[in-house]
Each structure stands twice: as C-alpha cells, then as structure tokens.
Image (tube, grey):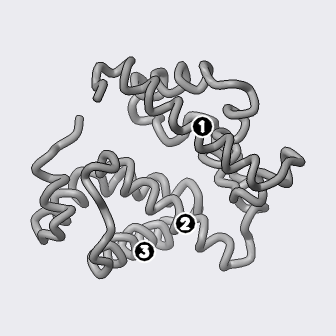
Amino acid sequence: MRDPSLEDAFARRSPAGYAGAYERYGRRMYATALHLLGDREVASECVHDVFLHLWRKPTGYVVERGSLEAFLVTCVRNRALMQLRQAGRGRAAVSKLDPPADYELQDDPIERDRIARAIAQLSDPQADVIRLAYFRGLTLNEVASDLAIPVGTVKGRLSAALTALRRSLRVEGGNEI
C-alpha cells in the first residue's frame, strides 16, 4: 500500500521522509542489493549510497511518477548493477546468480502473481525484453545482443510492455486513473 504522506515527505527531501522510507523499504532494498552483489557489506553500502545520492540530488523522486517503494528498489538495483559492471564482473556475475523471474516480489506472493499474470498477457517479444532487462538485469545493449535485434527495437518493445503492464496492473488492482 502506498503511503502518500511518506511519499510527499520524501519528495520534499524531509529528514523524517528519508528516515521513514529507510525504515519501511530498507530491508527490501538491501535484499535486492544482496541478491545482485552477493556480499552483505557491499549490499549495505549500496543502499547507503543510494540514500546519500538521493539526498544530494534535488530532483530525485517525483510522487506523480509512481510509488516510492518501486522507485527506491529500482535505484538500488541500478546502483548494484553499475557496481558489478564497474568491478568488471558485469554480465557474467548477473548470469551466474540466475535470479528467478519473480525474484523482486518474493516477499509478496499476491503481487508476484499479479505481475506474472500481467506479463503473461504481453506479446512474447515484449515479455522476453521485460524478463531480460528487469529480472536478469541486462542492459539494453545486452538484451539487443541476446535477442539479435537492434537496441531501438528493444527500447520500443520495452516501452510498449511497460505501458501495457501499468495499464493491466491498474485495472487488476482497482487503481485505475
């Protein structure tokens, strides 16, 4: 469930908003980082780095663009993948971890099932791009290489897939806008 007051406080860069976000979403962020990085200390530093970066960056989270939880988990995931690439382990380390397709939502089986149903409604090419980019952690260039298609095609399929997923999840969750 979204917490509008927490999201507003975080967007305003209120210390209480940051403390509340860490208290509420820190464990999920840490679990995501740990899964990708495989090291408790490095995962903890990754979460800390994300919060520090967001504190210093005046145009981070925007309430109208989505939930704070999704934003924070995406930030920590991106930071962890960047760390892997900078360490020279990149794709090999991500492939070696071989995360299940529903990893991000293992804590919440209802959400996992909702997303699995929404992904099943996508076309095969769109579902493939979502699985590779979001659940395998590949870059757009890596997705293009794996599927032997141009990066522009990957971007187009990803955009269409995300639009369809948003629409499907809003309808199923009763949160139509």
Q: In the structure shown, which secondary structural element does the residue marked by tag 1 occupy?
A: helix
For badge 2, the amino acid type reads: Ala
Image quarter of the N terminus: top left
Give the residue at mark 2: 80
Residue 78 position within the rendered picture, expressed as x and y whole percent measured from the top left: 53, 63
Rendered residue at 28%/58% (across/down): 62
Relative to 35, 1 lies left or right: left
Rendered residue at 64%/53% (across/down): 137
Relative to 92, 25 lies left or right: left
* Mark toward the viewer: 2 or 3: 2
Task: Reply above or below: 171 against 10.
Answer: above
For badge 1, the amino acid type reads: Ala
Kindly report the distance in space between the C-alpha atoms of the residues bearing marks 1 and 2: 26 Å
- Spot the residue most to the right: 148
Give the residue at mark 1: 160
Residue 129 position within the rendered picture, expressed as x and y whole percent measured from the top left: 70, 41
Residue 63 position within the rendered picture, expressed as x and y whole percent measured from the top left: 25, 52
Give the residue at mark 3: 45
* Mark toward the viewer: 1 or 2: 1
* Mark toward the viewer: 1 or 3: 1
Task: Evaluate if marks 1 and 3 touch, with contact meaning CB atoms under 8 Å apart.
Answer: no
Rendered residue at 69%/24% (across/down): 123
Task: Reply above or below: 107 against 31.
Answer: above
Task: Reply above or below: 159 against 1.
Answer: below
Label 1: how many residues lie within 10 Å, few (<14), some (14-19) or many (20+)? few
Relative to 95, 133 lies left or right: left
Kindly report the distance in space between the C-alpha atoms of the residues bearing marks 1 and 3: 34 Å
Q: In the structure shown, which secondary structural element does the residue marked by tag 2 occupy?
A: helix
